[in-house]
Image (cartoon, rainbow, N blue to C red):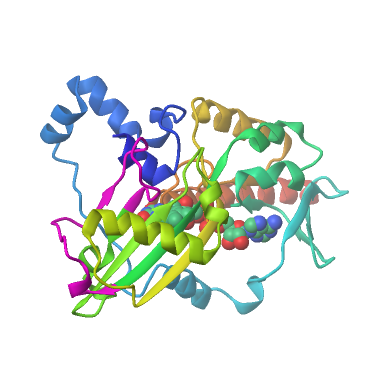
Amino acid sequence: MEPLLSGIYAGDIDQLSLKAIFPQFYEVEKRYRSLIIGTKRDKTYSNRFLTLRNGLESIVESMEEKLEESSIMKGIRVVKVEKSSRDQDYEISLNNGEHLEADSVIIALPHYLLPNIFPRYDFFEPLSKVPATSVATVAMAFSEEAIRKNFDGTGFVVARNSDYTINACTWSHKKWPHSTPDGKVLLRNYIGRAGDETVVDLSDAEIEQIVFDDLNKLVELSDEPDFTIVSRWKNAMPQYTIGHEERVKALKDNIVKNLPGVIIGGSSFEGISVPDCISQGESIVKDVLQYLRKLNTSKQEVISE
Ligand SMILES: Cc1cc2nc3c(=O)[nH]c(=O)nc-3n(C[C@H](O)[C@H](O)[C@H](O)COP(=O)(O)OP(=O)(O)OC[C@H]3O[C@@H](n4cnc5c(N)ncnc54)[C@H](O)[C@@H]3O)c2cc1C
């Protein structure tokens, strides 16, 4: 279990909260006494992988097409969010000096930024202590003949007590055949995990060599890669350490009390996967609409009074 869960969260399994990261496993274990027995009996478990044919960026592109052009600002940071002087709405300060006004604000940012964005509210402070791990992916393309020791499956994960630096490798050409031309193999390697992140800061050439050496030991490479792409994801993996659910609940309660109309979501809070982030988004939209309706009714009542 350790390489699998740590592979997904780039975390230290001893620190992670099972209830927060895999509540379904927690339930299965309670119900069937064993995770293996439970997953065999419970037919809701499927190991189908899904992705988007044109890459994950196509989600963002298609959302952008549907939105009004003026509703998107790129390359600009939110610096601060404060209640406006009227105390009914919010003023959002941007790093280009502009200020926006809003009745309701959805914050879908990495958690560690929130204490600075809401400096007047110390209930955001505990978020600055929640770790976020840095990782890098290293995609390497080879010709088929370069892999001497092929194996079944769509990839592998590596235990933390092994001598390898890579902690997982996806055989992208098998997992996503549409991603790779015939006769080529595409290996997507993962490096960096809680307690072992310094490797992410090495140069591209050093990382490439480390990953190549690891792969060579595992699959015996007879040739150099056609190309390598190193992508660093700094502080990108929020760690749902023990007590995570309680911390998020306390934070949300404080926000409702002190900052009505502000809603937080995204990978730092209730699920790190893309589907988790989408379902958080769907429920946030409902909450915002409900809040705006309530606000509208109370404003109309004030006008009629
Ligand atoms: C290497 C890697 C592999 C992964 N693999 C998978 C996978 O196979 N399946 C899966 O389901 N999930 C996977 N994930 C997890 C998933 O991709 C993320 O958890 C998810 O995309 C996070 O979405 P988000 O909207 O919460 O955060 P983000 O996508 O990080 O969005 C936060 C946004 O806030 C912006 N921002 C930051 N600061 C400011 C500011 N001050 N003002 C305004 N904007 C700001 C950033 O530019 C960014 O666009 C992976 C993650 C990584 C890093």
Q: Main secondary structure of the magenta part?
A: loop
Q: Residue at x 55, y 48 (%)?
A: 198
**Residue 247 vs residue 221, the one in the foreground:** 221
Residue stretch rendered in magenta on the structure: 142-168
Q: Quadrant for residue 190, please give it.
A: bottom left
**Residue 283 vs residue 266, the one in the foreground:** 266
Q: Quadrant for residue 172, please give it.
A: bottom left
Instruction: Work out which quarter of the rendered image holds the C terminus and state it.
Output: top right
Q: Residue at x 56, y 30 (%)?
A: 249
- The spot of residue 84 in percent (x, y) is 84, 50
State left or right for residue 240 relative to residue 154: right
Question: Residue placed farthest to the right in the image?
Answer: 85
**Residue 289 vs residue 258, the one in the foreground:** 258
Relative vertical location of residue 10 with respect to residue 60 in this rendering, above or below: above
State left or right for residue 79 relative to residue 15: right
Asked if the stretch drawn in magenta spans residue 146, the answer is yes
- The spot of residue 241 in percent (x, y) is 50, 30
Visible in this render: residue 274? no
